[in-house]
Image: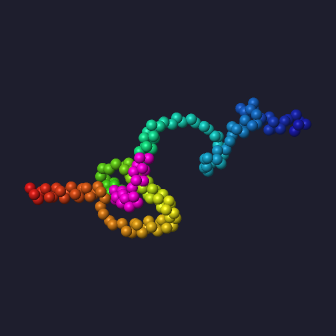
Amino acid sequence: MMALGLSSPSASLRLPSFDSHLSSSSRLNLFQFSPLRSSLFNGIRLRTSVAVPTPSYGGLMVVRMAKREEELKDIRAMTTEEINEEVVDLKGELLMLRLQRSARNEFKSSEFGRMRKRIARMLTVKREREIEEGINKRISRKLDRKWKRSIVVRPPPSLRKKLEEEQKAREAEKTS
């Protein structure tokens, strides 16, 4: 074709590119693969960085942490038996909250997480004490199962309060 004065099609169709003035290393930096994203699309992903302003809750976090530390001090001051009793009461309260939710009564949804975290903190302190005593995980679980079987079923404190109020109301009706 060169003999006829025609050039090859690839040479005649070569278009100027937008990055022809860039060096080869900076061209590579433009087209980096992003390993963080995975999808069925197997093409080139351009890495983009977008600055998103995050709100600062500095003072609020400090207050929460202070309350948590104060609560941990209170929990650590308790004996193991007191912790066990408190865990039983809190689990009963959690059950009452679930019943209120299923009955579509009014309740604070934030109480679920708060109670679960409080139970977890108490059980963590209990396990820390077991570790200090040298009790390994297997024996700890065995003791935990034994403790769970020995729990005497009783109404949670909130239900006990309601029952006592009802009983006082009945006694007041009888006397009048």
Magenta span main SS: helix
Magenta stretch: includes residue 159 = no
Q: In the displayed structure, does residue 156 sit left or right of residue 62?
A: left
Image position, residue 23 (x, y; %): 76, 34
- Compare residues 87 and 24 and report the one nearer the observer: 87
Tell me which residue sits at (31%, 59%) in the image: 156
Quadrant in which the C terminus appears: bottom left
Q: Quadrant of residue 22?
A: top right
Q: Which residues are magenta?
A: 69-93
Q: Quadrant of residue 121?
A: bottom left
Name above or below for residue 106 compared with residue 3. Answer: below
Tell me which residue sits at (47%, 59%) in the image: 129
Tell me which residue sits at (26%, 58%) in the image: 160
Magenta stretch: includes residue 78 = yes
Image position, residue 37 (x, y; %): 61, 47
Image position, residue 93 (x, y; %): 34, 56
- Compare residues 107 and 115 and report the one nearer the observer: 115
Q: In the displayed structure, does residue 121 sit left or right of residue 167?
A: right
